[in-house]
Image (cartoon, grey):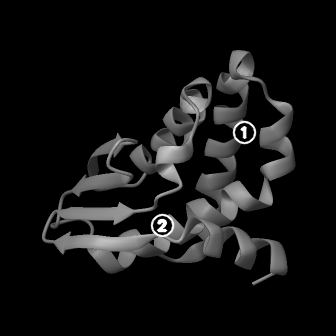
Amino acid sequence: MGLKKHFIKNYLDFKIVEDSTGLFKIYSKRIGAIKDKDDIYIDKVVQLFEQINGVDSINVSKSDCIIEVIYNPNILNSAKLQKYIDLILDLIIENSDLIKTHTPNNTDDLAVVLAAKFNQKAATANI
């Protein structure tokens, strides 16, 4: 892992707070620090999660600093889900310069690019 990836992952400091069949919750105090004007970017990350086969819904609570993933345990398990989360984090980190250039007004274009890159990474990750 490169220094930039390592720094960002440590900065986000995700902690698993619940891991039960069909429910996976992670906590990061940094979620609460996201400014309201940047909520559109959260929506684009949620769209990446929604592409994962077996994910039923994603709930983000900025006030509780929690991301809740509800998934179908017949299709997905928490170990695979954690690999997908790492994949999404890597994708965001690798494309941070691209993300910075997109204003909240043109995030739909960004979502299309990130979705295509995510699909490519997921296909080669053998998850």
Residue depicted at x 54% and y 27%: 36
Residue depicted at x 69% and y 52%: 117
In the image, residue 23 above or below residue 117: below
Quarter of the picture containing the N terminus is bottom right
Q: On the rendered structure, is 94 left or right of 22? A: right
Residue 73: x %, y % from top left: 17, 66
Amino acid of disc 1: Val
Tell me, yes or no, whether the two marked residues, 1 and 2, touch with CB atoms within 8 Å: no
In the image, residue 8 above or below residue 40: below
Residue depicted at x 68% and y 55%: 92
Which residue position holds label 1? Answer: 113
Rate crowding at label 2 as few (under 14), some (14 to 19) or many (20 or more) other CA atoms within 10 Å. Answer: many
* Nearest the eye: 122 or 91: 91
SS at mark 2 in the image? helix
Answer with the quarter of the image where residue 107 lies.
top right
Amino acid of disc 2: Tyr
Residue 50: x %, y % from top left: 40, 44
Q: Residue lying at the far bottom in this picture: please name it.
A: 1
Residue depicted at x 64% and y 68%: 11
Residue 74: x %, y % from top left: 15, 66
Answer with the quarter of the image where residue 17 lies.
bottom left
Numbered badge on residue 92? none
Which residue position holds label 2? Answer: 84
Residue 82: x %, y % from top left: 42, 73
Rate crowding at label 1 as few (under 14), some (14 to 19) or many (20 or more) other CA atoms within 10 Å. Answer: few
Counting residues from the N terminus, which is met first, the one under dot 1 or under dot 2?
2
Q: On the rendered structure, is 67 left or right of 2? A: left
Q: CA distance from mark 1 to mark 2?
A: 17 Å
Answer with the quarter of the image where residue 108 lies.
top right
